[in-house]
Image (spheres, rainbow, N blue to C red):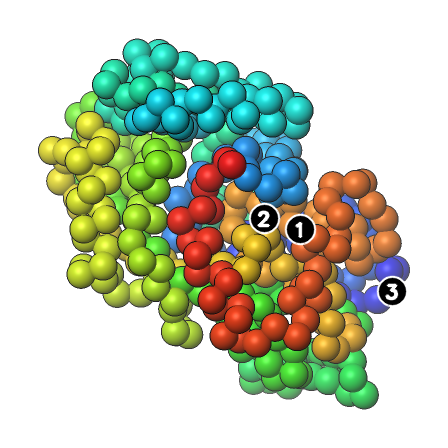
Amino acid sequence: MAGRRVVVVGAGVVGASVAHHLAEQGVGEVLVIDARSEGTLPGSTGLAPGLVGQLSADRDLARLAMASVELYARLPGLFHRVGCLEVATSEERLASFADDVRDGTELGLTPRVLDPSSAAELAPGLVEESATGALFVPEDGAVDPVAVTAALIGSARARGVLFRWNSPVRQLEEHNGRVIGVRLDSGVVRADTVVLAAGIWGPTLAATVGARVPMVPVEHPYAFTAPSEDLTGEAITMPIVRYPEHAVYCRTHGTRYGFGSYDHEPLPAAMGATAGRAFRDKTFEPALAKARKLVPALRTAEVEKRINGVFALTPDELPLVGPAPEVRGLWLAEASWVTHAGGVGKLLAEQLVGVSTGLVDPARLAPARFAGWSADRVTRASLPHYRGIYLTH
């Protein structure tokens, strides 16, 4: 693709990953455009809790997460390989860990089953010895999504990628069935290829050239406690903890605990200026209250901050990576978050330059897999996946 110009819309973690990998592949001219000022991430990236778990019910999602870990681990000091504990509160769940150990081992991970006391020793306050047991994946970890994004932007910029900030893209420009650029307030920026990595704003821009992004934005609660005397605030050393039977997850943030819950009805999100919305007490508070009863350290902790972040679901839980079927020259890197962003950027860059490392079969993530689906069908198929995002089987 030497001599061809690629414009990436969106400089969140996915857009930054795309830019980084395009630069690694030697793509001649890459320009990333974002509506925000540099260092400001009010979108989904800035609200993400930063959990990077690699085991998944889908083998390709696992591979994308592993590629993300490989990338993040190359960024000095930004990937904290503290591991992840999947806590079982029933014998049935504990028995299912045998399948996870087999699947993870086949992928090259080293998961193992722990007794309750060993799990509680690894994550004091987040696991108690009354649990049934836990699955520990030592290769998993946590990141600061904003810091990772900044590092990827710096890497891409060092390889010649240009960034244009404070420049909202108003629409895509099309001629004879091909996207030829993007329109800003200052005029049209020409491109041979446009990559949408705009998160929940992707569908609005795609629609300006008659293309569809088959995903559904949904709202999700996350909370931070007040500082705890039990936490030192030093580098992250405690594992991520998940309670899959209860759709609850938690981690430490310095001297604070952070936790989220999927134990509520999914709430489709209307388009808005940011990915952060007003907290929905009636829907979210009961779910967070149940999470606090489940996790020892949260039972008496004061909740200091609650957020409502928006992310996207697809009908099969997989990201949308590849060319849009309705118009030439438009590519999507959508419906992804921090866990898979490194792999998504790698896969898209490989497709654009026509190489393959065998990471994932591109057809599995191709936006065209939902061609002909109505918006209602996409919504009905996507929302039931809300609770299943973090399940390993």
| Residue at x 70%, y 60% (from the top left corner) | 366
Q: Mark 1 vs mark 3: which is more N-terminal? A: 3
Disc 3 target residue? 3
What distance separates the C-alpha of mark 2 from that of mark 1? Answer: 6 Å
**Please, is residue 225 above or below residue 378 in the view?**
above
In this image, 388 relative to 305: left or right? right
In this image, 354 relative to 149: left or right? right
What distance separates the C-alpha of mark 2 from that of mark 3? Answer: 26 Å
Instruction: Tell which of 367 and 311 is nearer to you.
Output: 367
CB contact under 8 Å: marks 2 and 1: yes
Disc 2 target residue? 341
Disc 1 target residue? 345
Query: Tag 1, which secondary structure?
Result: helix
What distance separates the C-alpha of mark 1 from that of mark 3? Answer: 21 Å
Residue 305 appearing in the image? no
Query: Tag 2, which secondary structure?
Result: helix
The total of numbered circles placed on residues is 3
**Please, is residue 364 above or below residue 212 in the view?**
above
Instruction: Tell which of 91 and 280 is nearer to you.
Output: 91
Three-letter amino acid code of the residue under disc 1: Gly
Query: Tag 3, which secondary structure?
Result: loop
Three-letter amino acid code of the residue under disc 3: Gly
In this image, 218 relative to 211: left or right? left
CB contact under 8 Å: marks 1 and 3: no
